[in-house]
Image (cartoon, grey):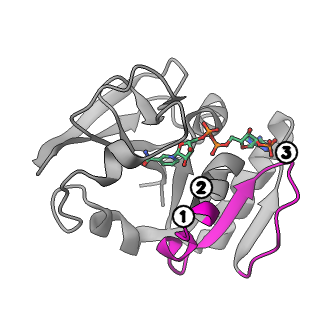
Amino acid sequence: MATIFYTASSVDGFIADPGNSLSWLLTRDVDPSGPMGFQALQPRIGASVMGATTWQWLLDHDEVGALGEARTFVLSHRAFDLVDGITFTSADDEAALREVHAGVVAAAEGRDVWLVGGGDLVGQFADLGLVDELWVQYAPVALGGGAPLLPRRLELRLEEVERNRDFAVARWSVLNSATLTR
Ligand SMILES: NC(=O)c1ccc[n+]([C@@H]2O[C@H](COP(=O)([O-])OP(=O)(O)OC[C@H]3O[C@@H](n4cnc5c(N)ncnc54)[C@H](OP(=O)(O)O)[C@@H]3O)[C@@H](O)[C@H]2O)c1
């Protein structure tokens, strides 16, 4: 099983614009069953992890259902309303973050873990060698600012690169990953 950061980005490396909007992304053409489309990942996911801003975006846009059956963990210090299948937690030091990751891996029951974002949260896991792969769908737009894709220095190896309609899509393995087991 692997811990995978799967996301879409602008070509200048932002996953949301400065107003936290995804309109630049959701208006583009993509084939979900095409190369590195979501249907390639979804059956592999046993659990997913996200930060509070991403969770709030899903709530605000009535998109919680898009998470499917996977157990979901939300990292936050905020008091969100409880939702079935969603675990709210926080991790303010390395030990706590390792514990969260172990809990997510256990919940995934042998399947993969989807890191939904944002970028700094993924970076926190990457700092501990707990991210195995990056899958990025690049939309044909530069945003000039917003929420960063992955604000860390990380060595990667390109594994796959394709076109999916409007998107340039690529998959990398993370070279310092301590967790990849296949
Ligand atoms: N392009 C895409 O495909 C895509 C994918 C995912 C997300 N997005 C968007 O990108 C944006 C990401 O926002 P963001 O960069 O602010 O990231 P985020 O990770 O969604 O949210 C950041 C917040 O998560 C909480 N958090 C992070 N690490 C934590 C930890 N270790 N322990 C406890 N809480 C922690 C903190 O909230 P507290 O205030 O609760 O402490 C922090 O302010 C959102 O607008 C989202 O909708 C886009």
Image position of 36 (left or right of 175): left
Is label 3's Cβ within 8 Å of ligand 1?
Answer: yes
Mark identifier at residue 57: 2
- Above or below 39: residue 91: above
Do residues under tags 1 and 2 come within 8 Å of each other at their CB atoms?
yes
Mark 3 packing: few (<14 Cα in 10 Å), some, or many (20+)? few
Q: Which residue is mark 1?
A: 61
Is label 2's Cβ within 8 Å of ligand 1?
Answer: yes
Mark identifier at residue 44: none
Judge depth for marks 3 and 2 and give the one in front: 2
- Above or below 169: residue 111: below
All told, the count of numbered labels is: 3
Do residues under tags 1 and 3 come within 8 Å of each other at their CB atoms?
no
Q: Which residue is mark 3?
A: 96
Q: Secondary structure at mark 3?
A: helix
Where residue 158 sits in the image (x, y, percent)? 25, 32
Residue at 86% from the left image edge and 35% from the top image edge: 93
Image position of 56 (left or right of 20): right
